[in-house]
Image: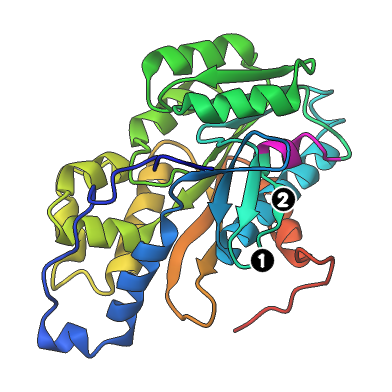
Amino acid sequence: MDYPQLFEPEEYPAAQQPSHDESQDADAQDLVEAAAAHTERGLVTAPDGHPARPISMHSLEKAHIASRYAQMVGTGMKNVFRGRLAWVELYAGPGILRLRESGTFVDGSPVASLKVRDRFNTYVFVDLDPKCTGAMRARIGHEPGVHILDGNANDANVHDEIAQLVPRDTLLVLYADPAELNFSFTTIEYFTKRYAHLDLLLNFPAPGLVRALRAGHAQKAGDVLNSDDPLGLIGPLSGRPGLSIRDYFQRQLAAIGYEHFESEPIRLHRKRTPIYDLMIASHDPKAKFFFDEALRIGREGQYRMQLF
């Protein structure tokens, strides 16, 4: 059984035909392929009878890094914050993933974050699709400290509900992994104003932002980037678009107090250009350490080689 698509396929129509110079550029072609591969649409039925989200291998890598980061923070900060740790996931999905390449079902980040050795004392999972939140409730049940919310990740009422569930003296990891360009910078500002100890774990889709801007979706891109003129970031004087946009976004985060950044490019198999970056931003340098440690061990338990 297949469920209807979560997003409209034409929400971001293809950009205009590139110029002759761009068409000769391998990076420009990668951007097109990356944008097409990034969006994980539709739901299928898992062996337990509840919905699962189909993903490709690159998304499995991202999910592994996120769960490793949860493990590092849970163990590394449990004594510092005496259990006042919260994992908040704004685009949580159904909790189970189906790998397209093999057909196997694996834990999504909500389920994986609950299986870390030193658990957080508060978990909040948010999703707009009631099929996803229904599946999570069926799988997770009524575990203590776990809250599943239906709603838009950028909605003020959802933000206020999270703030009521998570005390202000908590170390909060806010994980945002949207499938489209629908994560507003104002959401980051809301939680930044309320939590002195906040780690942002973000899917930052620089190629998707470039594609959206070229296709005329400046408002959506501007909401993500906190920019009134996002088109200026990909003009002829901006250098490579992805790098310019990444730099601009980090400057916006730095302006509201974030000092420590690290990111891992998530690529299609055998492609040079990232589909997106998995980015950490924090007030605390320990976040970079935990993120680097999360990257050291791959999905199969092997130590990863650093490529330069």
Residue 171 in the image: above or below residue 194: below
**Disc number placed over residue 102 in the picture, else none:** 1
Q: Position of residue 73 (x, y in %)?
A: 76, 41
What residue is disc 2 on?
A: 106
Q: Secondary structure at mark 1?
A: loop
Magenta residue span: 110-116
Task: Tell me which amino acid carries mark 2.
Answer: Val
Q: Quadrant of residue 220?
A: top left
Q: Position of residue 167 (x, y in %)?
A: 65, 13
CB atoms at circles 2 and 1 under 8 Å apart? no
Viewer-nearest of labels 2 and 1? 1
Say left or right for 299 vs 19.
Answer: right
Judge by depth and name the residue closer to the eye, 54 or 267: 54
**Residue 58: x %, y % from top left:** 57, 64
| Render colour scheme | rainbow
Between 184 and 125, the one nearer to me in the picture? 125
